[in-house]
Image (cartoon, rainbow, N blue to C red):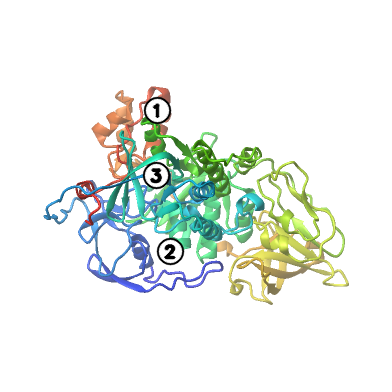
């Protein structure tokens, strides 16, 4: 890959202009950006293999890029660190962690413990949308609180979301981009002096003396709270298939971190497995950043994410194969090809249906698991605890914002403050957490002459921005909640506000006054790519709601509303008879998704299940068939869940193997949680707040 993979131009994000920082990787001089983490700096130079495993010499790269697994371990200035959460410093010497290479011994004597302790009214673990929203409510109630987050800035996953949010404009900033919501929430939080914020701070343990251990920039703190709010978010699920451990196969969230946070282009040709919102949105983000999206597979008969996200990809030219699954990833040291196949009702590949595609990246987006190990220990020791956001229930970030508000007020009330939860809030929260409802066939009708919007929102989802911005009040949802479908009825002045704000890019305008002879019409579409991707005068292939080709149109002009930055309104001259059918135009060349010459055949292979310890499926199956019914037994015998992640990535796949082997999960004992949630240097406890 190229040695310069930084994103210099982006339709939404501004290029980074940080100072350069020199460092070395395995003796090679490289340049990072100030504040950049090691993994992103290496990816920017085309380096995706960070080391090799001690067990079999297999190459290692990244998987989560969120500090939850241990795939990206390197040696930085003599210390073993996670590349995805460790910032490059000037002159840093980074080396591959190859096998069990000896680390330099630190012979400095350890001094007496100097651990800092403090009492707080409330501790909030996680500075994403739920945690910040909870902290704001506590601040309004006059509750002093400490909010900690393991990243260098607040916002959580909002900092990766360049798209506009769904939900309610009144309750969760619907129609605003996630990156902008992060700034809004952080700014609101800054008004409360009683809320202390510690970034780069990790909660590592909960103890029986009712204290929580926190590592913050080289010092160790013990915090004793009256109540804890766990808003630590979620981690990506692992998917087991042959080749899933190859560098270049990693989580969609890790991809968004590289692209949208650090402005690194980590792929040229990528493939996605998983049709939830995370996978669908990642595909759109890849296209915006100039990458080819070869395709997406979903094992279910339909994608679980919002249909507007799926339709958006299809219109741009990305194939979406439902009832399909990934069979294997192939490559010599890194992924070079993915093989997919049609799936039967048990989600097993159907022999003879295989297709192979040449790719350099495979994104795994098969769901999220709550980060809730904090909650279990807090309850065990009797510390009052509430969960907010994905730590309690996996949902959209809009729901996390609202759940944080409710939890913040609940804790304030329990502490004797007069901040009761309004009676309508739980109902609003339930709506925002709703899964997609009915899909109703699109009825185009014929609104007649003039200018009018065509609304292609055909699936019931929680969303209402278009109804709030129409100056004529002509777009309405005729249901008690925002789960209904918006419909146009009335007059339209052609302002384009509804087109500019729709999070699903599901609204266009039709101008029938463009050609008095009624041979041509003007269709105005939302466009979130650079103007160079569809220059005025160029001819484009127009498509319908789900990406089927309608005909051709000629780009006439761009315009941009001042109230919606980074989204253009693109006018296309089209035949009169096509005016209502056109929902977009194809951006990606169809040849991008052409299968490779040969996809091979299905074959029995033995995939890695436990990434940290390189334990294969056959080893786990052997122990289960020999009578193992306790994951702790597997841990002792074949080392599953013994690695740096503590079973966070392999536990669920192991339970899946038990089910596949016909063992009821009620008969299986889960592995014991570690007393520390994440790897922590022993010197941290010995020297306390002193720098190591």
Q: Position of residue 658 (x, y in %)?
A: 39, 29
Q: Is residue 267 left or right of residue 529?
A: left
Circles 2 and 3 in contact, beta carbons < 8 Å:
no
Q: SS class of the residue under badge 2? A: loop
**Quadrant assignment for the C terminus:** bottom left
Q: Which mark is residue 120?
A: 3
Disc 2 to disc 1, how far (Cα)? 43 Å
Tell which circle, 1 or 3, labels the residue nearer the N-terminal end: 3
Is disc 2 surrounded by few (<14), some (14 to 19) or many (20+) residues within 10 Å?
A: many
Q: Which mark lies nearer to you, 1 or 3?
A: 3
Q: Position of residue 336 (x, y in %)?
A: 40, 57
Rendered image quadrant of residue 360: bottom left
Residue under label 1: 661
State whether residue 353 appears in this view: no
Q: SS class of the residue under badge 3? A: strand
Q: Which mark is residue 262?
A: 2
Taking the spot 73% from the left edge, 47% from the top edge, the residue there is: 485
Q: SS class of the residue under badge 1? A: loop
Badge count: 3
Is disc 3 surrounded by few (<14), some (14 to 19) or many (20+) residues within 10 Å?
A: some
């Amino acid at each position: 890959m190229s040695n310069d993979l930084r994103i210099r131009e982006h339709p939404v994000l501004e290029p980074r202009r940080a100072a350069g920082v020199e460092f070395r990787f395995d003796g090679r001089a490289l340049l990072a950006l100030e504040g950049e983490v090691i993994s992103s700096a290496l990816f920017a130079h085309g380096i995706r293999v960070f080391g090799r495993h001690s067990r079999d010499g297999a190459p290692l790269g990244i998987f989560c890029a969120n500090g939850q697994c241990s795939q990206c371990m390197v040696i930085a200035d003599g210390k073993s660190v996670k590349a995805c959460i460790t910032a490059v410093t000037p002159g840093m010497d980074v080396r591959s962690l190859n096998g069990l290479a000896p680390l330099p011994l630190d012979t400095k004597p350890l001094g007496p413990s100097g651990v800092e302790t403090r009492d707080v009214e409330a501790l909030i673990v996680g500075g994403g949308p739920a945690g910040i929203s909870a902290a704001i409510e506590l601040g309004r109630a006059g509750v002093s609180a400490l909010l900690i987050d393991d990243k260098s800035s607040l916002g959580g996953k909002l900092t990766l979301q360049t798209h506009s949010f769904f939900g309610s404009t009144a309750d969760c900033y619907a129609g605003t981009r996630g990156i902008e919501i992060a700034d809004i929430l952080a700014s609101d939080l800054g008004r409360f002096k009683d809320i202390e914020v510690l970034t780069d701070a990790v909660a590592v343990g909960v103890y029986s003396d009712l204290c929580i251990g926190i590592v913050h920039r080289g010092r160790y703190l013990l915090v004793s709270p009256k109540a804890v709010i766990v808003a630590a978010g979620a981690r990506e699920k692992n998917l087991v298939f042959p080749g899933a451990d190859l560098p270049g196969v990693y989580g969609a969230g890790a991809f968004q971190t590289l692209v949208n946070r650090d402005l690194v282009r980590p792929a040229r040709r990528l493939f996605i497995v998983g049709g939830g919102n995370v996978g669908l949105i990642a595909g759109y983000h890849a296209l915006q950043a100039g990458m080819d999206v070869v395709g997406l597979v979903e094992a279910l008969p339909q994608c679980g994410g919002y249909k507007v996200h799926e339709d958006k990809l299809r219109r741009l030219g990305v194939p979406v194969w439902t009832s399909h699954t990934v069979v294997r990833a192939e490559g010599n040291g890194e992924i070079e090809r993915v093989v997919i196949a049609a799936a039967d009702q048990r989600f097993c590949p159907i022999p003879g249906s295989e297709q192979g595609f040449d790719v350099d990246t495979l994104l795994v987006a098969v769901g999220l698991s709550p980060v809730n190990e904090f909650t279990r220990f807090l309850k065990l020791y009797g510390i009052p605890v509430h969960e907010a956001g994905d730590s309690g229930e996996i949902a959209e970030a809009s729901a996390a914002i609202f759940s944080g508000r409710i939890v913040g007020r609940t804790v304030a009330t329990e502490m004797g403050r007069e901040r009761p939860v309004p009676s309508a809030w739980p109902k609003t929260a339930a709506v925002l957490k709703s899964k997609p409802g009915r899909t109703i066939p699109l009825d185009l009708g014929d609104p007649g002459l003039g200018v009018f919007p065509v609304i292609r929102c055909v699936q019931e989802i929680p969303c209402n921005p278009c109804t709030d911005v129409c100056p004529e009040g002509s777009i309405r949802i005729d249901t008690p909640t925002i789960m209904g479908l918006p419909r146009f009825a009335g007059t339209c002045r052609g302002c384009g506000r509804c087109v500019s704000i729709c999070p699903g890019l599901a609204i266009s305008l039709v101008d029938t006054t463009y050609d008095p002879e009624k041979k041509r019409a003007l269709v105005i579409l939302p466009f979130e790519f650079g103007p160079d991707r569809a220059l005025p005068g160029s001819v484009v292939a127009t498509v319908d709601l789900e990406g089927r080709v309608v005909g051709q149109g000629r780009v006439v002009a761009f315009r941009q509303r001042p109230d919606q930055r980074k989204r253009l309104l693109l006018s296309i001259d089209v035949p009169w008879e096509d005016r209502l059918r056109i929902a977009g135009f194809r951006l990606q060349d169809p040849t991008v998704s052409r299968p490779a010459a040969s996809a091979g055949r299905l074959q029995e292979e033995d995939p890695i299940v436990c990434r940290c310890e390189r334990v294969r499926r056959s080893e786990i199956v052997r122990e289960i068939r020999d009578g193992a019914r306790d994951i702790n037994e597997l841990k002792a015998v074949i080392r599953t869940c013994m690695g740096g992640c503590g079973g966070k990535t392999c536990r669920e796949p192991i339970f899946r193997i038990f089910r596949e082997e016909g063992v009821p999960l009620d008969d299986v004992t889960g592995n014991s949680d570690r007393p520390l949630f994440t790897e922590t240097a022993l010197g941290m406890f010995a020297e306390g707040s002193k720098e190591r």
